[in-house]
Image (cartoon, grey):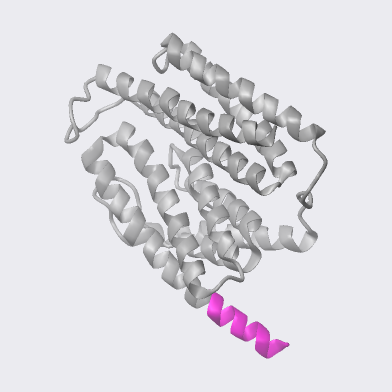
């Protein structure tokens, strides 16, 4: 049964990709997108519609991947919760399709409906399965305290450094990701994900960034992936930090393609990848080494 669900999950991942991004491309072409060097000029309402739609789509794809990996490794509880989240996200995507914000082609609607049926089936299967790995433990008081402090530090560092380096694309370059990476390295994926989501959204709201919701999957998955390097050899830490930074930059890049067009999206991508994630990775590794050395001295 598990192998069948794994195969179905991979098929659903492919169909979900097709059913979300092809309609978005078709809609963009219908309003004037003609090629890779086309600059887009969209209204604020259209920017909100596209960016929120793509945010839900990217979150659904990421959740689907988590389901595949957790089910393969036997983490039934994680699979169960991921199934619930994917079900909700897919229903939201169906809602967008019905509204006509994206192409309402019957084929794409069928793909999304299949995703919903699959995620519900997997969730019900997970509830019936016996737990084969430890369940997700609730946050401790200590973890909540650290998440609160590090989220605040992420927001402060993002706001204070965001205006130091001007950007030709209208965004801002900052080193707030340093705290996200640092938290992930010393506390793991769960805390890294929460600090990435909460801290980044808090900074976006303070700066009145209109598409703050994109930061939830972008920096959330960034912290989640970076946390896989906790207590690992240096080369593995760097690898997971790079993958996390790449995920963050790629999320914004995909959204920016539909909002700004390819030329400005590519500039923003390089800025996020090297100027933001790259510098933050170096600083977080230095900070982790200093803090761990201090802790050893105190002990």
Residue 116 vs 279, above or below: the answer is: above
In the displayed structure, does residue 135 sit left or right of residue 63? right
| Location of residue 73 in the rendering, given as x and y in whole percent from the top left corner | 66, 49
Residue under the point 28% across and 36% down: 260
Residue under the point 79% across and 60% down: 141
Judged from this view, the residue extending furthest toward the bottom is 297
Judged from this view, the residue extending furthest toward the top is 106
**Depth check, front residue: 18 or 43:** 18
**Depth check, front residue: 12 or 146:** 12
Residue under the point 51% across and 68% down: 237
Q: Is residue 297 magenta?
A: yes
Q: Which quadrant would the C terminus be assigned to in this image?
A: bottom right
Q: Is residue 153 visible?
A: no
Q: Is residue 75 magenta?
A: no
Per the picture, the main secondary structure of the magenta-coloured stretch is helix
Residue 209 vs 179, above or below: the answer is: above
Q: Is residue 286 visible?
A: yes
| Location of residue 29 in the rendering, given as x and y in whole percent from the top left corner | 25, 21
Residue 289 vs 125, above or below: the answer is: below
In the displayed structure, does residue 241 sit left or right of residue 171? right
| Location of residue 259 in the rendering, given as x and y in whole percent from the top left corner | 32, 33
State which region is magenta.
288-299
In the figure, residue 44 lies in which quadrant? top left
Q: Which quadrant would the N terminus be assigned to in this image?
A: top right
| Location of residue 169 in the rendering, given as x and y in whole percent from the top left corner | 27, 46
Residue under the point 56% across and 65% down: 229
In the displayed structure, does residue 41 sit left or right of residue 129? left
């Amino acid at each position: 049964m598990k192998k069948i669900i794994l195969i179905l999950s991979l098929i659903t991942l492919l169909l979900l990709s097709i059913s979300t991004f092809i309609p978005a491309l078709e809609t963009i072409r219908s309003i004037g997108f003609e090629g890779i060097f086309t600059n887009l000029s969209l209204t604020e309402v259209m920017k909100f519609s596209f960016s929120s739609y793509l945010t839900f789509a990217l979150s659904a794809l990421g959740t689907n991947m988590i389901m595949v990996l957790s089910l393969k490794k036997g983490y039934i509880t994680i699979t169960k919760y991921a199934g619930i989240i994917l079900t909700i996200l897919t229903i939201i995507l169906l809602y967008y399709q019905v509204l006509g914000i994206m192409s309402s082609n019957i084929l794409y609607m069928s793909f999304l409906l299949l995703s919903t049926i699959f995620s519900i089936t997997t969730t019900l299967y997970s509830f019936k399965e016996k737990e084969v790995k430890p369940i997700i433990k609730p946050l401790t008081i200590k973890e909540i305290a650290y998440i609160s402090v590090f989220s605040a530090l992420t927001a402060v560092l993002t706001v204070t450094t965001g205006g130091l380096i001007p950007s030709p694309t209208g965004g801002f370059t900052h080193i707030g990701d340093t705290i996200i990476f640092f938290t992930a390295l010393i506390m793991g994926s769960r805390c890294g994900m929460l600090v990435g989501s909460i801290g980044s959204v808090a900074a976006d709201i303070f700066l009145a960034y209109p598409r703050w919701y994109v930061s939830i999957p972008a920096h959330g998955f960034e912290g989640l992936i970076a946390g896989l390097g906790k207590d690992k050899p240096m080369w593995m830490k760097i690898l997971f930090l790079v993958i996390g930074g790449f995920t963050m930059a790629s999320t914004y890049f995909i959204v920016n393609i539909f909002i700004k067009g390819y030329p400005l999206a590519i500039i923003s991508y390089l800025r996020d990848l090297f100027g933001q994630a790259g510098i933050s990775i170096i600083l977080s590794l230095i900070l982790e080494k200093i803090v761990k050395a201090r802790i050893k001295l105190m002990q």
